[in-house]
Amino acid sequence: MQIVLYQPEIPPNTGTIARLCAATDTRLHLIEPLGFSLEDRYLKRAGLDYWPYVRKTVWPDWAAFLAGREPGRIVLTSARRGTAYHRFSFSGDDFVVLGPETRGLPREMLDQAGHVVRLPIWGQVRSVNLANAAAVLLYEGYRQTGELDRREAGQDG
């Protein structure tokens, strides 16, 4: 699995997601434009000293990402549309795409998507924090595909 942040806006969220990716050895893709510089002190602070361990690729736009990425299924996320993540069947080659914090993924992308997942929300909020959503989706995907068990077994030996 790989995490894709489409036009992220808030440095601490991206830093926290980068730390998650470093902790799980998960590739991180950043689709420009970014709402900050990769040199931003808040971004670096959230990622702490883990940035050297983040396998990241920065893409100039969505088209470049689609043309240059490895093979795999694209799974878009939405706060209100799609299959609840716990009912969705993740695959090991999924690219989980999360949209910008203030507006989410564009409607055109969601309308054309083959796979859209959401985190159920029944409280009075617009959405779940981007970094929290990334963590929930990544670990659920790794759980479903058996990756958690494989990696745990590798650490136990």
Image (tube, rainbow, N blue to C red):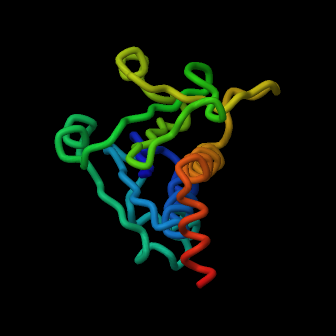
For residue 26, side relative to residue 68 (left or right): right
Question: Is 27 placed above or below 151 here?
Answer: above
Res 72 quadrant in image: top left
State the residue at coordinates (55%, 27%). Answer: 78
Q: Position of residue 59 (x, y in %)?
A: 26, 49
State the residue at coordinates (58%, 24%). Answer: 83
Residue 42 in view in this figure: yes
For residue 6, side relative to residue 69 (left or right): right
Q: Position of residue 73 (x, y in %)?
A: 36, 37
Question: Is 2 placed above or below 103 here?
Answer: below
Q: Position of residue 49 (x, y in %)?
A: 52, 79
Question: Is 21 placed above or below 72 here?
Answer: below
State the residue at coordinates (41%, 77%). Answer: 52
Question: Is 47 placed above or below 78 here?
Answer: below
Residue 35 in view in this figure: no
State the residue at coordinates (48%, 39%). Answer: 98
User: Count of labels shown?
Assistant: 0
Which one is nearer the viewer's eye here, 91 or 109?
91
Residue sitting at the far right: 123
Residue sitting at the far bottom: 157
